[in-house]
Amino acid sequence: MNKDWWTSERQRMGYVVSCLKGKAHDQVRYNIKDGVVLFDNVDAIKEVLKSAFGDIDAKATAQRKIFDMKQGRRPLTTFLPEWYAVAKLTGWDSAALISHLRRGLHENITWRLSLTKSKDMPTELTQFMDLFMDLVRTCDNECRQVNANYFKKSTSNSPTNQLPGLQPTSAPQLPTPNGADLMDLSATTWGPEDVVSGRRPQNDAERAARKAYCTAHGLCHWCNSDKHRSLNCDTAPWNKGKA
């Protein structure tokens, strides 16, 4: 409703009430005395009608709400179900919803997603959600296998140093281009010569640099092969004993 049509909120409420008929008018009649609408504002009238009849335009409400949904510091297990419940009501296709979801995810997760090759990026929403959940799980697993104390180091830090991944207390902090990692990677690099030599990283900073290089170039994080991911590497220690 165009607010500039009316000079006061009381006039706007009078117009809204005049548009209501039957059961809808019955819901607000209790707060009309001698032709004067006693609600505080038009929004208060709308809330009464919503409580009685539900959201009369759930699609439009969901489309407005999804613009403001951000993961922030919350774990994916909290944010994702809430986001998906709203997404289903928008009526949008997968491409639009994937775009909005990427906007809402924590920057460390979107950075890791940016390293996925375009040809490997799903175009269907649920498959896209499965992809980044797998990325977080893989990183979690690798960090635990390579350095058993990786997560213990962050326990004394502020919660803002923890990636809000699958679990708020154990999700790994992914190395990011702007240095927002628990480790300072500014003086540590990993390149083709390190891959060719076959040498292993000697400290946490080198491990993180190596992981970033392998991810960016589509290499296995354990054996440097471009034929598989580390999750499926036969020589990786975390796959030992698997059938």
Image: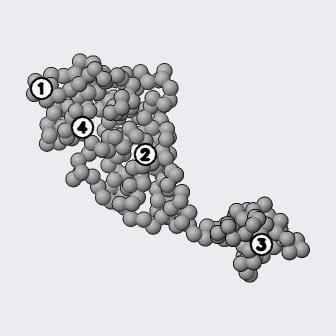
Mark 3 or mark 2: which comes first in sequence? 3
Q: Say which amino acid is labelled 1.
A: Glu
Q: Are marks 3 and 2 in contact (CB under 8 Å)?
A: no
**Residue at 78% in and 60% down:** 40
Q: Give the SS element for disc 2.
A: loop
**Residue at 48% in and 64% down:** 90
| Residue picked out by circle 1 | 193
Disc 4 packing (10 Å; few <14; some 14–19; many ≥20): some
Q: Reply above or below: 74 against 3.
A: above
The Cα atoms of the two marked residues, 2 and 4, are separated by 19 Å
Q: Give the SS element for disc 4.
A: helix
- The N terminus sits in image quarter: bottom right
| Residue picked out by circle 3 | 14
Mark 3 or mark 4: which comes first in sequence? 3
Quarter location, residue 233? top left
| Residue picked out by circle 2 | 105
Mark 3 or mark 1: which comes first in sequence? 3
The Cα atoms of the two marked residues, 3 and 4, are separated by 62 Å
Disc 3 packing (10 Å; few <14; some 14–19; many ≥20): some
Q: Say which amino acid is labelled 4.
A: Thr
Q: Reply above or below: 233 against 26.
A: above
| Horizontal and vertical percent position of residue 199 | 15, 22
Disc 2 packing (10 Å; few <14; some 14–19; many ≥20): many
